[in-house]
Amino acid sequence: MRNSWLEISLSRLHENVLSIQKGLNPSTHIIAVVKANAYGHGLEVISKSLFDCGISSFAVATLDEAINLRQSIPKCKILVLQGCLRG
């Protein structure tokens, strides 16, 4: 396995989101996919940053991720991509 380093600039993330939003119809609804701990970058930090940009809907892979996200951002909309099996 190779080591890698990735650094996320929250200010650049904001700029990118605003740039994308400018090119969309104002009625377009964005759902940010933040599964797998926001692809390893921190679910709470990335989601809160996106929420501050006006994104209020998020997609996660599992129910556990949805619960964590709900605790972090109570007013967001959450789509769970994985089916919930009955026990």
Image: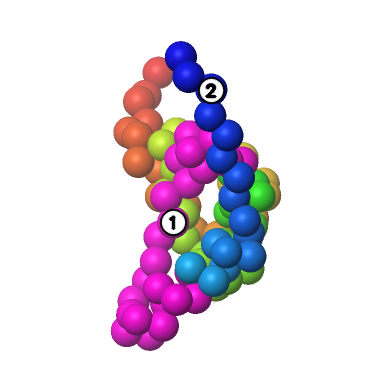
Instruction: Verify whether residue 26 appears in magenta.
Output: yes
Is 41 situated above or below 11? above
Residue at position x 54%, y 71% in the image? 15
Q: Is residue 72 left or right of residue 34?
A: right
Mark carried by residue 3: 2
Name the one closer to the observer, 6 or 18: 6
Locate residue 35: give its quadrant: top left
Q: Is residue 26 visible?
A: yes
Instruction: Verify whether residue 18 appears in magenta.
Output: yes
Name the one closer to the observer, 4 or 51: 4
Q: Describe the element under mark 2 as helix, strand or loop.
A: loop
From the top left corner, tell me how far across and down residue 25 is, in percent. Answer: 32, 84
Compare marks 2 and 1 and give the one earlier in the sequence.
Answer: 2
The segment highlighted magenta reads 17-42
The residue identified by callout 1 is: 32
Q: Describe the element under mark 1 as helix, strand or loop.
A: strand
Is 5 situated above or below 22? above
Report, in whole angstroms, how far the alpha carbon at label 2 lies from the one at label 1.
27 Å
